[in-house]
Image (cartoon, rainbow, N blue to C red):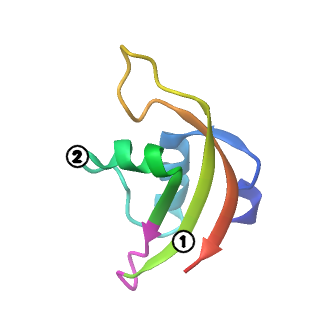
Amino acid sequence: MKNLLAKEMSFTELDNFMIKKGYYSVFEDGCTKEIKESANVIYTSTKTNEAEISIKFEITQDSGEDEIEESFYLKAINITKI
């Protein structure tokens, strides 16, 4: 996970990476706005059903007015095991 630090990627790329690592997707109706506002996303393990990873990020390119909310780029600045 530390290889995500300071790497710029789309929110979709981050979510797909975390799914491959054994975490549930965070794409649920309405949650993206709150994730963007807090600049933090928490991933839950598919094995334990417990929240395990917190990723703080900064938005490097926000979604445009004519794009879906998930269409933004970010850079992870802190990854914490909960």
Q: What's the residue at 46%, 43% (across, down)?
A: 36
- Contact between labelled residues 2 and 1, with CB atoms less than 8 Å apart: no
The CA distance from mark 1 to mark 2 is: 21 Å
Q: Which residue is mark 2?
A: 29
Q: Residue furthest left?
A: 29
Determine whether 66 is above or below 15 in the image: above
Q: What's the residue at 53%, 27% (across, down)?
A: 62
User: Could you tell whether 76 is left or right of 36 in the image?
Assistant: right
- How packed is label 2: few (under 14 Cα within 10 Å), some, or many (20 or more)? few
Whether the magenta-drawn stretch holds residue 9 is answered as no
Q: Quadrant of the C terminus?
A: bottom right
User: Could you tell whether 12 is left or right of 46 in the image?
Assistant: right
User: What is the chief secondary structure element of the magenta stretch?
Assistant: loop
Counting from the top left corner in percent of width and height, residue 33 is at: 36, 42
Secondary element under disc 2, as helix, strand or loop, is loop
Q: Which residue is mark 1?
A: 53
Counting from the top left corner in percent of width and height, residue 15 is at: 48, 51
User: Could you tell whether 40 is left or right of 34 in the image?
Assistant: right
Instruction: Say the numbered circle drawn on residue 18.
Output: none
- How packed is label 1: few (under 14 Cα within 10 Å), some, or many (20 or more)? some
Inspect the image, locate mark 1, and give the three-letter code of the amino acid beneath it.
Ile
Inspect the image, locate mark 2, and give the three-letter code of the amino acid beneath it.
Asp
**Span of residues in magenta:** 43-49
Residues 40 and 10: in front is 40
Residues 2 and 41: in front is 41
Counting from the top left corner in percent of width and height, residue 48 is at: 39, 86
Whether the magenta-drawn stretch holds residue 46 is answered as yes
